[in-house]
Image (cartoon, helix red, strand yellow):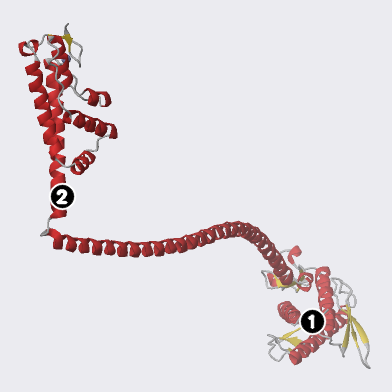
Amino acid sequence: MGWNCQECGQPLQLDRSLEEADQHTLGIAQATVKEALGQWNTVSSETRQTHLNALSLPSSVHQAIQKQLQHANSTPETLSASSDKQQYQTRLFQTLSTETFAANHSSALRHPLCEDCTKQVLDRSTQEIEIARKERNALREFEDDCTSEGHESARMQKRRSLRKEVQDIASSTQQVQSELLACDSAQETLQQELNAVRQEAESFANTHAEFWIAFNQQTSELHQMQSELHRNQAQAAVLCEMLNHLEQANAYLDVFDIGQDERGIATINGWHLGRLSTAHVSTAGEQIDWPEINAAWGQTAFLLTVLSRKLACEFTQYQIHPCGPLSAVERLGADHAKYELYGTNEWQIGRLFHSRRFDQAMVGTLACAKQLCERACDMDPALDLPYTIQKDTIGGASIRLQFNHPDTWSRATLSLLITLRMLLHWAIDQNFKP
Ligand SMILES: [Zn+2]
């Protein structure tokens, strides 16, 4: 019968010592196993159990070891009855094998083994032994620490130290927990404040948006109002300018346009009131015609009437009858008479008579003008009129045409019209109602 390796299954060639196995060889092997197990049995069962527990072996392994121990303690079986080598080898391998142990532990040994498997098993056993030795040393040190009397006080001190350290740690843990609670409370407060700030920011953002909407509306309205204001201001400026123009453009000044031409002859509404001296007349058409002079006297008579109405001044000596170029002056009183305020080129017939009546009419006109001046000066003492009227003269020039120089007469009529123009301006400034 051949043998195979119990690990890898390779066929084995047994050593000569095993080939020649007999009762003696079996006895040596059994004795060796018994001796080894006997050393293990010298340790108390409690210590063995403690060491096995420290090795953290499974309970099935413990049971296997216990059985192996019991089996080793039993009386070695005698195989003297058998002389077959094959049987000796079988019993020898059974003795060496821990069959019961192997049935419960995969790493247990079963014999025979080849050299390679033996080497692997030895290596594995060496590592396990080394691990077991280290654990044993650690346990021994622990046991020494536990049993040593010299270290009792140190252990007590260490225990107190550890207890104090535990108390400190518990105290610091409690403190940290209280701080943690305080932090949680602070965090909650901060979270509430943050929420309030967020709500406030949101409210502010809404207010901000509403403000800008209102601001834009107000700005738009402001621009519209400004443009309307500018339009109204422009319109007001135009109206003011028109008003000033209208205020300055007085109807009386338009109706009675008094001036003088380049020759110094007075004009009213474009009609000359004066005569050129014969020395200054080069052509027959240059002399001022009487119809023009009569029309100018008619305008002057009308102006006197208007001024008397504006100043509420009723003439006492004369009455003016404005009638265009055929106006007249009526003398009031006992010596009542009416004089023509116009002349004619055809003075040849009754020239002296007519000239005297014309002169009387002009003197009456001058008297009316004097009464108006006196009335105006009474109303406004500050009024300063440039010409003085005395009897038939104004500014020293006689208003009479007969026996008078044309230049003197023209100067007198110019003075009269200038005086009447000043009265008219003054009356307009006084804002008299017409
Ligand atoms: Zn093998």
Q: Amino acid at mark 1?
A: Phe
Q: Work out which quarter of the rendered image holds the N terminus and state it.
A: top left
Res 86 → quadrant:
top left
Can the viewer see residue 44 in this picture? yes
* Above or below for 309 versus 19: below
Residue at the spot x=5%, y=10% of the render?
16
In front of the other: 224 or 368: 224
Q: Work out which quarter of the rendered image holds the C terminus and state it.
A: bottom right
Cβ(mark 1) to ligand 1 < 8 Å?
no
In front of the other: 411 or 367: 367
Q: Earlier in the sequence, mark 1 or mark 2?
A: 2
Does 253 sit left or right of 25 as displayed?
Answer: right
Residue at the spot x=16%, y=45% of the render?
139
| Distance (Cα) linking label 1 and label 2 | 143 Å
Does dot 1 land on a helix, a strand or a loop?
Answer: loop
In front of the other: 183 or 397: 183
Res 96 → quadrant:
top left
Residue placed furthest toward the front: 81
In the image, residue 61 lies at what x, y percent? 25, 31
Res 224 → quadrant:
bottom right
Q: Amino acid at mark 2?
A: Glu
* Above or below for 324 versus 7: below
Residue picked out by circle 2: 143
Q: Which one is in front in this view, the residue at disc 1 or the one at disc 2? A: 2
Residue placed furthest toward the top: 1
Does dot 2 land on a helix, a strand or a loop?
Answer: helix
Ligand 1 picture quarter: top left
Residue at the spot x=18%, y=21% of the render?
97
Residue picked out by circle 1: 432
Image label count: 2
In the image, residue 89 lies at what x, y percent? 14, 13
Does 253 sit left or right of 174 as displayed?
Answer: right
